[in-house]
Amino acid sequence: MKNLPSDQSPQQLDDICRSETLISRYDHQFNFMVHSVAQMTDVAFCAVLMPCECNLVVACATDESIKRVWLPDEFTNLADTLQIGGKADTRFIKKFPVENAQGKIAAYLVLADHESKTWRADDQKVVDRAVSHSLSIIESNNKKYRLAMYHKLFDVSSGLMGIANFDGVFIEINPAFSEVLGIDRNELMVHEYFDFVHPDDYEKTSSIVQELRAGRSINHFVNRYITRNEEVRYIEWAATPDLEDELIYTVGRDITESVHKDELLIKGKEKFQKFFNNVRGVLCIHDMEGNFTELNLAGYMATGYSPEDLGKISLYDLIPPENHGKVRAYLNAVNMGGQASGEMTMVKKNGESSIWYFLSVVNEDADGNREVLTNMVDISERKKMDRQLKQAKEEAEMAYKAKAEFVANMSHEIRTPLNGIIGFTELLLQTDLDETQRQYLELINQSGTSLYGIINDILDFSKIESNNLELSYDKIVLEEVISEAVNIVLYGLEKKRLEVLLDIDPLLPRYMWMDAMRLKQILVNLLGNAQKFTEKGEIKVYVRVLEELGNNSMRIRVGIKDTGIGIPEDKLPIIFKAFSQGDGSVTKKYGGTGLGLSISNKLLELADSRLQVESQEGVGSDFFFDLSVTTEDEELDLRLGEIKRVLVVDDNSNNRKILRRMLEIKGVEVEEADSGLRALMTLSDDAKFDVIIMDYHMPIMDGIETIRKVKELQANQNSEQSFIVLYSSSDNEELKQACQELDIENRLVKPIRMNQMYDVLAKIKDIQEKSAPSKPEIPEPTEQSLRILIAEDNPINMTLTRVFANELVADAYVIEARDGKEAVDLFQKEQPDLIFMDIQMPNLNGYEATRKIRALEDHVEIPIIALTAGTMPGEREKCLAAGMNDFLAKPLLKKTFAAMLKKWAGSDIQDPV
């Protein structure tokens, strides 16, 4: 053993220390210290056993009895065999406790030998000296260990640990100081800690230092430090003074984040309290039994109670006794579900009652107790207004019903004479008149048509605004609907000599499901505007396929583009408003109610669409809308037999493009000429075409003159005669006469419909049309004539309808009935092929007469067409439900009447002139 006292016998010390093993650490580790091991012969040993909680493996005797007697119970994991001087037995063992100054055993000194020994007093002295020295070593090592642990803790601690003197100078600091303050340790050590304290905290920090000087320890002291980045960090300190060495031992932790959270929490609480106390609505908090714990100012005012009453009142004091069952149900609801809402009658302190809407949620307070936060709104006035509104609504509905009946009756009364005015002026305009007569009649016709449009707009707008208009979807051919709309405004377009183009996407399926009547109404509105505001150029109606949606549906765009006056950019936002146009001067110049675009937009809203516009002042406008439609296609013959090459002659480039697209989809080669002269030059080069499509209205040389030249050219060249299709926007008698002279049998009226053109081209080569729409099955006409029954009580309307029928059907036999009863009788007697049925008639109205006729029919169903103003909501549906086949709105126009005849009486109907 090293450094033993020198007054001991060297031999005795050597005898002990030669085999000494010393555990000298005060933790779970152990260390053997062997003196002169190399000189050992008969090895004796000693071991210092540290009384600790863990099991230590130590050198010891192998005799089990000795282990049980001398060793502590916890030292059980001992070596099975211990060789001492080459022998496995032990004859001597003795242990001595090593006690510290407090009398606590720090270790045991154990002596053992394989030979029996006699214990002597000198041996005890040596052992005492060894025990004393062992305690000195143990305490020294323990102190070193604790110091090492302290340094380790000092270095790795995230808390700020340091030693400073009372003058503010750092003696020692750990790395956490540098990490928190962002300042290098060497720099910190040459400054006083006051250099880093926030200026506002100098005074209280100096005060704390004075307390430490006085010998008082401090805890939970917080001050602010400035970091390298000039950030403010909050540090909480615990410090103890050492007055003897005039030092301060301190430990700190950075609580900046916690302080900020506390500040936010305090601000949040302050905001909540301000909101709680100042909000106009009633806010309150009550416990799970309904006892109020908090009530805001509005709550006190609403209930009549004061803050002194808080803690004494509950929900049961505010709710009438007859509703206490509802209170219990409410408390159960919030307890089980965590929230509740509803209406409840509340009684003030003075006895006044009111109706309140409440919304409650369960919350936990800071102590974990459940409470209910409730917001309440007085809805007494709203309830009163609801009752008044309900009463007003009932009165309004009664007034609306009366107004609807009045509007329907007035519509009938207005339209009946208007029908006569428009119809007969239209007929008179087709007779021989002098210029003055024609001018006056045209003015009458225009005035009547204008009045008709105004009445329609007002009635439609009234129906839309009252939500009494619904769309009725039918299977239609879109191209036909567009053509019908164009025909309605065609007269005005021809007068202005405006070019009308029909540009239909070839990919568009033939059939789709739409409300044909409302779609036509929208198109007529847009076409009417385009015609009204366009003085020269063209109007194009186009349809584009935007995207395939699958399941036989697609999204399409329908638009009308003109070359008119355009719309100023600042006027675009208001053009869809009712009773407004882009400019007041426009109304004065062009007329109109300003309802057309508004009505069109309202109708499109019913189909989940809207009207859009792109316009440039002085250039023109493009109005369009997108629709999602269900479609149905049919197999089409995309060939035109022997027709391989076609020459298109037209001065309008857009029209040539449209025709080219129509023909190329059929596999036809197309060549274009922009004038009659260009066409002659093309043909003079011996170019061969199966068909020449010739426009009539062209500058310098019109279509008729060009055809004459072509025929002369072909006659001179002795070439094969090409077939020529003439199309024109003005199909008049003079033009017909010219076509007859030139032997032109095939004519098409603009705008050109794709299927119409295919039909004419197919007819040229005797190709049967494969894509024509199927017609409803109708009875074949009699051998003598087409028998038409007209049921109409108004003489003017009767005369007009009869004239239209006789002019359009060469062998028409018209049967006249003055009321519904007479119509039923004549049906039985005459067996007509087609019936036009007025709705409002004496004796039997149109619905009743139709039902009786249907009951009398035997197998064959006769087509019945309703004649009506069409103003009442659901009138079309009522007509169809009564058994009618179709619907014709008054006033009657010859073109729409002709279209209806063609639809239900076959194709042997003359075109209206």
Image (spheres, helix red, strand yellow):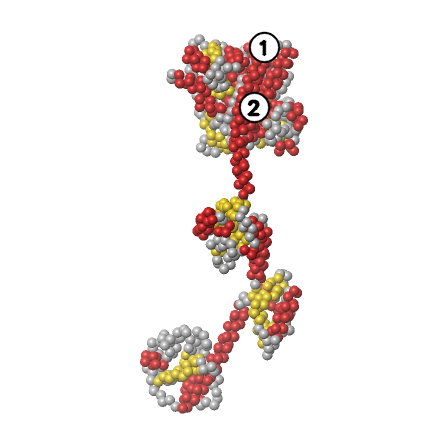
Categorize mark 2 by other alpha carbons within 10 Å: few (<14), some (14-19), many (20+). some
Residue at x 55%, y 17% (from the top left corner): 416
Furthest residue to the right? 585
- Spot occupied by residue 677 in the image (x, y as percentages of width and height): 61, 17
Residue at x 51%, y 54% (from the top left corner): 313
- Spot occupied by residue 228 in the image (x, y as percentages of width and height): 63, 63
Residue at x 44%, y 85% (from the top left corner): 130
Q: Is residue 679 above or below residue 164?
A: above
- Spot occupied by residue 57 in the image (x, y as percentages of width and height): 39, 75
Q: Amino acid at mark 1?
A: Thr
On screen, residue 13 versus residue 434, left or right, reads: left
- Spot occupied by residue 377 in the image (x, y as percentages of width and height): 54, 46
CA separation, marks 1 and 2? 29 Å
Q: Is residue 478 above or below residue 860?
A: below
Q: Amino acid at mark 2?
A: Asn
**Image quarter in which the C terminus is found:** top right
- Report which quarter residue 527 is drawn in: top right
On screen, residue 226 versus residue 21, left or right, reads: right
> Which disc, if any, is residue 456?
2
Asked if one can make out residue 36 in the rendered structure from this viewpoint, the answer is no
Element type at marker 2?
A: helix
Which of the pair 798/155 is nearer the observer? Answer: 798
Q: Is residue 412 above or below residue 612?
A: above
Residue of label 1: 431
Asked if one can make out residue 74 in the rendered structure from this viewpoint, the answer is yes
Which of the pair 311/704 is nearer the observer? Answer: 311
Categorize mark 1 by other alpha carbons within 10 Å: few (<14), some (14-19), many (20+). few
Q: Is residue 616 above or below residue 854?
A: below
**What is the total number of numbered labels drawn onto the structure image?**
2
Residue at x 58%, y 15% (from the top left corner): 421
Q: Earlier in the sequence, mark 1 or mark 2?
A: 1
